[in-house]
Amino acid sequence: MNRFTLSLLPWWVLAGALLFSPAARGEIGPRVRPPSKAEFAAARTLFKRGVVVLIESDAQGELVQANIFGMINAPQQTVFDVLSDPSQLPDILPAVPADSIDLREKRGNAQNYRWRYGGSIMSVDGVTSQAAAPPLAVQWLLQKGFGPGQMLWRMEPEGNQTLVSLSLNI
């Protein structure tokens, strides 16, 4: 947002964005941050053992977020395409049937959709708001179902593979 655009916003929009709590601004659940370059570097050294998980807690022992790193045997754009397309959820979560995904709204790189996760033990109805930054990141705000919470997928190319991090707090 440039200075010109910022100056066009009414003062009460700016006050609300800066002064009100996340809940009052309509944000749901805990926030997550992308892993640092140092965390990515540390994860790279451990991939021969499999998936890498870093769990971060605060001084009181409360969960701040978990970061899960893995190497995907596909190019970055392919990984991004799968993670940013709700119709492909059944490919990564077979318990989400294709006919349960209902795209409610889409504007640019943002969308909101409903889904159902069903299995023999449990069934969950969910609502997710998603924002994408092609081909680097996809963020899922889980409003209902497995939420409230936030999942941030980051993708970094590694030759013909992709280093994927999932930062989450649900």
Image: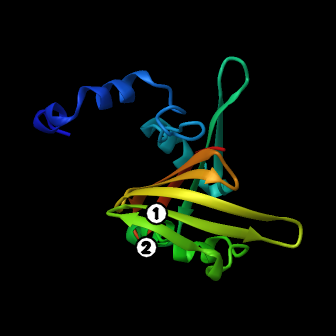
Asked whether the viewer can see residue 58, the reply is yes
Tell which circle, 1 or 2, labels the residue nearer the N-terminal end: 2
Q: Could you tell me which residue is drawn at 62 percent across and 81 percent down?
A: 98
Q: Which mark is residue 71?
A: none
Determine whether 140 is above or below 102 in the image.
above
Looking at the rendered image, the quarter that the C terminus falls into is: top right
Left or right, residue 34 beside residue 14? right
Question: On the image, which quarter does residue 49 sit in?
Answer: bottom right
- Three-letter code for the amino acid on which mark 2 is drawn: Thr
Q: How is the image coloured?
A: rainbow
Give the residue at the far left of this rendering.
4
Q: Which residue is mark 1?
A: 162
Q: Could you tell me which residue is drawn at 71 percent across and 63 percent down?
A: 125
Determine whether 83 is above or below 139 in the image.
below
Asked whether the viewer can see residue 155, the reply is no
User: Judging from the image, what secondary structure is the residue with disc 2 in?
Assistant: helix
Residue 123: x and y in percent read: 80, 66
Crowd band around label 2 with a 10 angstrom C-alpha radius: few (<14), some (14–19), many (20+): some
- Three-letter code for the amino acid on which mark 1 is drawn: Thr
Crowd band around label 1 with a 10 angstrom C-alpha radius: few (<14), some (14–19), many (20+): many
Left or right, residue 105 beside residue 92? left
Give the residue at the far bottom of this rendering.
99
Front-most of 164 and 108? 108
Front-most of 119 and 99? 99
Residue 27: x and y in percent read: 51, 39
Q: Which residue is mark 2?
A: 78
